[in-house]
Image (cartoon, coloured by chain):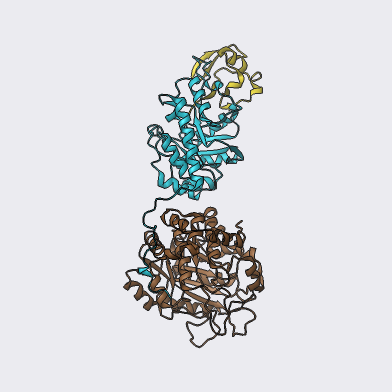
Chain colours: A yellow, B brown, C cyan
Amino acid sequence: MKIVCNGTEHQVAAGAKIVDLLKEFDLAADTVVVECDTLILKREDYDRHELREGSVVELIRFVGGG
Amino acid sequence: MFVTPDFAELKKAIAAADAFDVQQALAAERIGIKGLAALLSPAAKPYMGVMAEKSAQITGRRFGRAVQLYAPLYLSSFCSNRCVYCGFSADNQIERRVLTLAEAEHEATILHDRGFNHLLLVSGEAPAKMGVAYLEELALRLRDRFAAISIEVQPLRGEEYARLFAAGITAVAVYQETYDRDVYRQVHLSGKKSDYDHRLATPALVAAAGMREVGIGALLGLSDWRAEGLAIGLHLAWLRKHFWRTALTVSFPRMRPAMGEFTPPLPVSEREMTQLIFALRIFDPDVGLLLSTREEARYRDGMLGLGPTRYSAGSCTVPGGYGNRDVTGEQFSVGDHRNIDEVSEVIRQKGFDPVRKDWDPIFQMHGRRPQSAALVI
Amino acid sequence: MLIIAGRSFRSRLFGGTGKFSSPAVMKEALDASGCEMVTVALRRVDLADPADDIMSVLDRERYLFLPNTSGARDAGEAVRLAHLARASGGGEWLKLEVTPDPRTLLPDPIETLKATEILVKEGFHVLPYMNADPILALRLQDVGAAAVMPLGSPIGTNQGVLTKAMIEIIIDQAQVPVVVDAGLGAPSHAALAMEMGADAVLVNTAIAVAGDPVRMARAFAMAVEAGRAAYESGLGMVSKDAAASSPEDGLGFLR
């Protein structure tokens, strides 16, 4: 199924969870915050929260800034 | 909550100042409490000329060449306090009266006709004889004729100040009389006023209630004037930090040794009071400084432009005294007997503008009573 | 000791983490600066290079992260970024930036006040970036800002403390700490702000883009310390006309 992650379309397996998405990008769960369909997810929910067709996901992290 | 430092500590801080500290303060933009202590100290005596110049400069820059004029209107001489220095003290055998609302309005009308737009309502502290309801009703009757109405009455509660503000009173004076706790106890024998801390907390209540202006001060002659000055400075600074929306004023009621009256234990000379005025002006460029008719015409004229920004004029300190010259029982005797026109004339001659009004309550939206029904129909 | 929202800081220099040539240089420079609080921004992970996590080089035990809301154009966006920052492990600390004008990046006072009010109620320690407007500082303080961060000059311009007269009033009036932020281009600018009585300064660009960021970081640390020491020692004033007693020409009326 198709989702939008950080503004671009991605193909993920049906029933994929957040944790699968992070694995695909090789991202450690404790370095990012995940917003899925405008909801900020708790870290403990990453392996429970299922993606749906058309889900809009934002993967956010701290970067350099003043 | 504002807490006065120990009076002895204040005296010590002042005594520690030397000529170098005075010079530093006189060269600084913001002198701070340490600078104020220096300018109040004996070490500043030789610098009176420089202080006068600096004080005048700051006053001119902040207030321009304007001098505000006001008149006190005494409403009641009843008082439940026993204060050894005051003509209204409950112990004193004087003829006492409280003006009826109609009488008070009549007195106000006389002052209005004489050209005053700024009124200070004064009374002894006897809530049973003259309370909030009285002040509220009087303010409502007067508010459309006067640009500013201030009060100097017993300390009230926060919600009472808010009520009076809605009725058109915009400023409150609550003088501590002395910041010296020991002396305070000695001179305030009984009555509500004998509670030092309650009185000290009142200016903050006034500000929190939304009044545009609060006045503080010490009665000069009760204790060490230099330490009083430093305490006033601390109180001002604290009020500024916590109530930045509120304008502040300081008054300088000076007791003079006189026959049959209370003899001040530590009389303050004209020169000393002048040093106090200059020091506070340099410390706080924005504070309004009041000089009442307790002082003589010569002195008041001389001080024009040097620091004070507000003068009373044509004052009578007995309830009903404007309409009837024969009433007796005044709070203190007046040193400048000129009427408002005479005072205004001198102010003009010296190149200043006598301002009889400042703010117009018409601009204040909050709490206005609707116009009378007759106008609506 | 500087205390903000109950936490004490030994260093009065706050660092920024943007614009460095590499994470390694950033780390070395921040270590040299002695600062204990660093600002960080929030951005989407670059999915083309997801391993590029520059913040991982910084020791979270040593540095308190102060997440900013850079990029927010109104209060709503700032609040959303604040929530993301908290979820990212930023704790309750927040440098609130609302900058609708992408050219100058000057802060919007109205949206900043709105956002501060909302975020304080949500339990954030809000440090709003603001123009050097004394009344705004008091209004922000009144709604619960933990500190105020007036700008010295427009961000990234290195022009120093152009807002000196206003910042002096802010310092004079504020009950919360005043952190001068933005525009400090040289250690002397930071020293000036500290001599004026600022509680701290925040420096990013001037360190990050210096020829030698590590030495520049050290230079700022020394300047901040020098300025603070001068402030606490009581600066000797330039004496103009008060050196000697002068005649009392105007006081002849005194008795």
Please give left or right for residue C169 compared with residue C84 in the image. left
* Figure check: C136 above or below B118: above
Q: Quadrant of residue B190?
A: bottom right
Q: In this view of the protein, which residue sits in the foreground, B124 or B98?
A: B124
Quadrant showing the C terminus of chain C: bottom left
Please give left or right for residue B283 compared with residue B206 in the image. left
Q: In this view of the protein, which residue sits in the foreground, B94 or B321?
A: B94
Kindly identify the residue that appears in the image at 50 percent across and 76 percent down: B73
**Residue C206 place in picture, x, y as percent:** 42, 30
Kindly identify the residue that appears in the image at 39 percent across and 68 percent down: B67
Please give left or right for residue C158 compared with residue C127 in the image. left
**Residue C94 place in picture, x, y as percent:** 55, 35
**Residue B356 place in picture, x, y as percent:** 40, 70
Kindly identify the residue that appears in the image at 56 percent across and 57 percent down: B208
Q: In this view of the protein, which residue sits in the foreground, C45 or C150?
A: C150
Residue B60 visible in the snapshot: yes
Residue C41 visible in the snapshot: no
* Figure check: B9 above or below B126: above
- Spot the residue most to the bottom: B326
